[in-house]
Image (cartoon, rainbow, N blue to C red):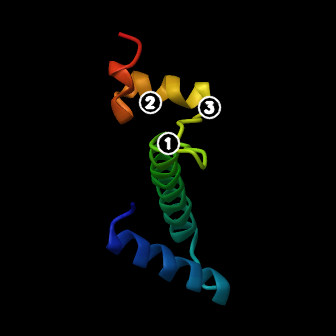
Amino acid sequence: MLAKEKLERLSQLAQLKKEGKLTKEEEIEQAELRKEYLSKFRQSMRNHIEGIKVVDKEGRDITPKKLKAVQKEKGIHQRHLEGK
């Protein structure tokens, strides 16, 4: 995730914008921080989703094939050992 200082700055800029006191330079800074925040959030979410293993009530792995392929490629859940 984004560093604590950057998150705090993003919050400060949001408050300034809400109050109508945001300068052009601060608007640019806010846009850059938002872009960085979203990029890191998306990567974090992707990593989380790629690590998911779906199991049914009987304990069988029913992870979708597309997800299994990604996991195998990245060596997640020992998928790189499957199929040998």
Give me the C-alpha separation between circle 3 and circle 2.
Answer: 11 Å
Give me the C-alpha separation between circle 1 and circle 2.
Answer: 9 Å
Q: Position of residue 64 (x, y in %)?
A: 62, 31
Between 22 and 7, which is closer to the camera in this rendering? 7
Q: Position of residue 73 (x, y in %)?
A: 41, 22
Label located before the other in sequence (1 or 2) = 1
Residue 51 shown left or right of residue 65 in the figure: left
Residue 1 shown left or right of residue 35 in the figure: left
Q: Position of residue 69 (x, y in %)?
A: 51, 22
Secondary element under disc 3, as helix, strand or loop, is loop
Label located before the other in sequence (1 or 3) = 1
Q: Which mark is residue 71?
A: 2
Q: Residues within 10 Å of mark 1 (few under 14, many from 20)?
A: some
Badge 3 vs badge 2, beta-carbon distance below 8 Å: no
Q: Which mark is residue 64?
A: 3
Residue 34 in the image: above or below residue 73: below
Q: Which mark is residue 53?
A: 1
Badge 1 vs badge 2, beta-carbon distance below 8 Å: yes
Between 50 and 56, which is closer to the camera in this rendering? 56
- Please tell me which residue is depicted at 42% across the width and 72% down the height of the picture: 7
Label located before the other in sequence (3 or 2) = 3
Q: Which mark is residue 29?
A: none
Badge 1 vs badge 3, beta-carbon distance below 8 Å: no
Q: Amino acid at mark 1?
A: Lys
